Amino acid sequence: MKRLIIILFILFLNCNLTARKTIIKMATLAPEGTDWYGLLAEMGQRWQEVTNGEIRLRIYPGGVVGDERDMIRKIRIGQIHGAAISAEGLTEVNPQYTFCFIPMFFQSYDDIDYIRDELKKDLLSGAEKNGFIVLAMVDVGWVYWFTKEPIYIPNDLKEQKIFTWAGDYKTGTLWDQAGFNSIPLAVPDVHSGLQTGLINAMAFPPIFVLANQYFGITSHMLDMKWGILTAAIVIDQKIWDKIKSEYQEKMLIIADDIGQEYQLNNREDADSAVEVMKGYGLQVHKPSIEQVKEWKSIVESMYPLIRGNVVNAEVFDRVIKMSDQLPSRQ
C-alpha cells in the first residue's frame, strides 16, 4: 500500500510538471540551418531559460506546414501557435503590411526604417485586433529579380514566366493587366517549378535565393533594388494570454533583441550572398540610368492598379505622402 502511494505521488508530480510546460509550435519557410531559422532557435532557447523551462518552442522549418497563408490559417484553427513570416503572410494578419509592396519605392535602409517607425503603432495594433501579437519586426533584405535569361528592361521581363505567391490573386491580376505573365505557386513548390520550366523569373532577396539554391537555374540577377522584404514573428493571442505576464515581458524583450541583432547582421552580410552565388556562376547585370528610368516609369504607371488592390489604399496614400520626407530624398 505504501509503495502504491509513492508511485501515485510520483505520477501526480510528473503530471503537474508536464502541465506547467507550454509548447509553442512555430512555423517558417526558412530552411533549417539558415540565419532566420537560427534566430528562432536562439529565441526558443532563451525563452526556455527565462521562463524556468515553462515555455518550449518547437520549430517547423522549410515550409513543412505549408505556405505563409497556410500558416496563418493553421494558427487560427489552433494547429500551430505562431509563425516567422514575410510581409506576404503578414497581410493576412493586417493588410497595412502591404506598405512595402510598392516596387522601387524604398532605396535605402534609412527609408524603410523611417516608414516602418511611422506606421509601427498601427501595424502592431491592427494585428492585435485580428488576434495576433507581433513579437518582432525586421527586414530580411533587398529584393532583386533573378531570372533564367538576362533581363534589362520591362519588356524583357514580359517574356518571362514570373513567380507570384499562391493565393495572392490581386498581385497576379495586376501583373497580367500590365502585360506580364504571372504563375502562382506556393513557395515550397518554387524549386520544382524552376526545374520543370513552369517559372523562370522571381523577385527574392539574395540570401533566400542562396539558402534555397535557386541560383542554379535563375543564374541571372538584375542589380536594381526592386523592393524590400519585411518580416515579423507573430504568435496567436490566445496562447499568448495564457503565459504569465512577467514571462511575456521577458519574451518580448528577447524576441525584439534577437530580431534587431539579426537585422543588423543581415544588412551587413547581404552582399556576401551575391558574392557566394557569383562563385557558382551567377551573373549580375547592372542596368543603365536610362533602363532604370524605364522601370520606374512603368512602375508609376501601375500605381492606380497597385493602390487598393496590392497595397491597402489608406497605407498607399500615407506612404506616398511621406515620400518627400524619406532620408534618401533629403
Image (cartoon, rainbow, N blue to C red):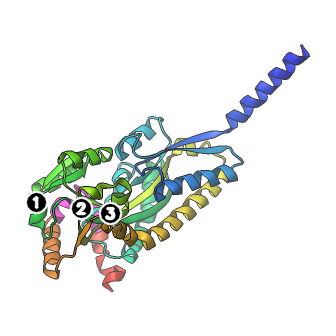
The disc label shown at residue 219, or none: 2
Residue sitting at x 17%, y 81%: 289
Report the residue at 34% width, 80% height from top: 325
Q: How many marks?
A: 3
How many angstroms separate mark 2 from mark 1 (CA)?
A: 18 Å
The residue range painted magenta reads 303-318
Task: Determine whether the residue tagged by mark 2 lies in a helix, strand or loop.
Answer: loop
- Examine the rendering and report whether any part of residue 240 can be seen: yes
Q: Nearer the viewer, mark 3 or mark 1?
A: 1
Q: Quadrant of residue 270?
A: bottom left
**Residue 99 image label:** 3
- The label nearer to you, 3 versus 2, is 2
The amino acid pointed to by label 2 is Ser
Q: Which of the two labelled residues, at mark 3 and mark 1, occupies the earlier sequence position? A: 3
- Please tell me whether mark 1 sits on a helix, a strand or a loop: helix
Q: Which residue is mark 1?
A: 158
> The residue under label 3 is which amino acid type?
Phe
Q: Judging from the image, what secondary structure is the residue with disc 3 in? A: helix
Tell me where residue 56 appears, x and y as whole percent. 61, 44
Q: Quadrant of residue 95?
A: bottom left
